[in-house]
DNA sequence: CATGAATGAGGGTTCATTCAT
DNA sequence: CATGAATGAACCCTCATTCAT
């Protein structure tokens, strides 16, 4: 459904693993990690419940794998779009588009990653990727503030949280990415592209 | 912990009911509705699990009660602060302060209300209150747009979702309400108070 | 079935707890701790499987409780019969009778306690009781050796293990305690009573 | 680890089969037959779980093979040492040494064979070997009783169970075979060798 | 009002077993 | 010979719910 694979899987097992991940992302997005049952995930992946354990050591590990998939796929999109050329304003715009595209394309994974309960108590792999993602955004914001594109008063980290919070709310609600981006730019009084 | 009572509770039973509600809000905020067990809630409220059923007909009803408490307390704060006098800019500012105050004061309840999984499948009472809350905000936004305080292009509902999304992200992260409000106003280029 | 209660239980719950313990002892004696299923134990105790958890926190704890019951009941019998009056030979005889009586009366509990897999990895409560039981026996043996009743060469601990090993083999095989005692005394060339 | 092979194994398959048997004996000795998983056995034998099925038709058959290995190796040792020449006392001593040697050399297999849960419900092959082993011992005992080496009152079968029970207890506890033999002879007041 | 006790459904997990490759 | 992958049954355990006391 939402392709977020890190590496191209080849064997039969890799395909099954991906089916399980997609099903898990959908189920967790809908019911939360505690409410998502392995039975439902297995059914959606067209497997028996116990078969999941050939691919993931526990439900917890499966949830963690979904988280890492979500954040690493988002990071990949940010890398592709917000390249370090262009003016701060251009890069900020590109970042907003990348984030909204990730929300739209990874919907289930994104919903899982963004659920507030996940901020804490997650495995190091995920936390490292998340920190990296936030670091990139802090840079974009700081450059835009230095440049006058964004108001200079608030700290970049604060601005980043507000901006991403706004984008997430719109993205998770299913708003059209292009419209949302335009609305954000207008509110922030960015000069027209 | 976070007092969000609608009516003044008298008698021993009402106090117990509130203890259960507070415990439920905390547990749900931390583990989600599916992950919050009546056993843990009862333990936090210093009761036996079965005793909850004297106060709430089912777990579902308890969750609903927490939701209604959260949204109605937020609405009360919005009513108190964003009174229909003053300029659109003043009222917008007041709304932001009210929302952030609610997030800070009702932390657990607010977290429950805001978790994205709750948008759908909730009882009519809650949905009505939620709709009312959003309606107030749409008004505030529309007035501010008409007035030039906010950019006029995007639809008010869109702007409202972005703004509340930004505030929620900061509020749930535990940011100081006053700082957050200043940052938001600066980013939106609102004229100084 | 085999009454091994430490304290007289009164309430309804205590009776159920004992029913579960007896059923668990029987099931473990027959299939080993890993092979004993809570389902079978619950069925024998006329309960639903899950109901066991009201009385014991886990299967592991239930197994431990069976072990402690078995060893503490054996110790009680030893205390009652091998009182510190009389000659070493009399006390040794009394000890043998006490051990055989425990094996006969506690059959399932005894079988569980004696299964070789239980020597290690058991909870401190059990290990302490077991050590105490062995200590009593070492004393009996040492006195009998000092007295000439038993051969003086081997270490008391060694003799104790051999003697208890012999008694357990006969007891678990269901031999008549009196006959077994007579055979042991004859082999050891104890003077007739 | 403990070599108990009946026939000289040639070829790669036979070696694998032996690795599985040894691993199974160790696992069963430690966790009982129900607690020993094919997964753990396969891991110890450095194989995948499914590969065991090339060598044994089922887990039950594997357990049976371990049992037969254990008892037949014990029987072989008894045949070698307690030959039908010499006085009854000499042959009894030789039998004790053979049994203790088997316990020491076959430790895991011996532990499996001796676990009380195995007396019943085992396949005919094993039961026949076991009966034969006990028959030899009964002879040794009866001869020693007829000769006055052992007390004549108790039935030979009874004495045999007591003696083997004593030896097993010491052997499974890891006692030194020579010391144990000396202790047993001293307790039974056998004339010095 | 509150508790102790029990239920039954369902959840996560393990595991013996099968089979195509 | 051996493996990777999958199955399905059984397992231990949790939990919402009920009810006599």
Image: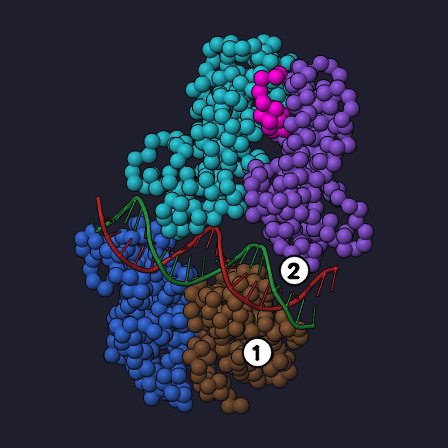
Chain colours: A brown, B blue, C cyan, D purple, E green, F red
Dividing the image into 4 quarters, which one contains the C terminus of chain B? bottom left
Main SS of the magenta part reads helix
State the residue at coordinates (53%, 42%): C32
Callout 2: residue from which chain? D
- Where in the figure is residue D119, as x and y percent of width and height? 57, 39
State the residue at coordinates (45%, 67%): A36
Give the label on residue A3, or none.
1
Q: Magenta segment, which residues?
A: D151-165
Describe the element under mark 1 as helix, strand or loop: loop
- Where in the figure is residue E3, as x and y percent of width and height? 28, 46
State the residue at coordinates (77%, 28%): D83
Q: Is residue A176 a member of the stretch shown in magenta?
A: no
Residue B139 versus residue D117: which sits nearer the camera?
D117
Please tell me how many numbered marks the rendered image carries: 2
Task: Categorize mark 2 by other alpha carbons within 10 Å: few (<14), some (14-19), many (20+).
Answer: few
State the residue at coordinates (36%, 30%): C7
Question: Does residue B192 appear left or right of residue F19 in this picture?
Answer: right
Question: Does residue A23 appear left or right of residue C21 in this picture?
Answer: right
| Residue D86 in view here | yes
Callout 1: residue from which chain? A
Residue D68 to residue C161: above or below: below
Q: Circle 2 sits on which residue?
A: D50
Residue C176 to residue C58: above or below: above
Residue A184 versus residue D102: which sits nearer the camera?
D102
Residue B11 to residue A109: above or below: above
Disc 2, disc 1: CB below 8 Å?
Answer: no
Describe the element under mark 2 as helix, strand or loop: helix
């Amino acid at each position: 459904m939402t392709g977020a694979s890190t590496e191209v899987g080849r064997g039969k097992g890799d395909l099954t693993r991906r089916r399980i991940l997609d099903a898990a992302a959908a189920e967790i997005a809908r019911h939360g990690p505690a409410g998502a049952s392995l039975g439902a995930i297995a059914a959606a992946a067209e497997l028996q419940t116990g078969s999941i354990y050939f691919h993931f050591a526990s439900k917890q590990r499966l949830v963690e794998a979904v988280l890492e998939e979500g954040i690493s796929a988002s990071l990949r999109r940010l890398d592709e779009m917000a390249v370090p050329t262009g003016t701060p304003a251009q890069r900020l715009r590109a970042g907003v588009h990348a984030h909204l595209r990730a929300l739209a394309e990874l919907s289930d994974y994104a919903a899982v990653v963004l659920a507030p309960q996940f901020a804490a108590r997650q495995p190091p792999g995920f936390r490292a990727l998340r920190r990296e993602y936030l670091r990139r955004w802090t840079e974009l914001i700081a450059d835009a503030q230095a440049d006058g594109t964004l108001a200079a008063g608030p700290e970049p980290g604060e601005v980043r949280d507000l901006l991403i919070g706004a984008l997430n709310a719109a993205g998770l609600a299913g708003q059209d990415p292009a419209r949302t981006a335009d609305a954000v730019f207008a509110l922030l009084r960015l000069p027209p592209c």
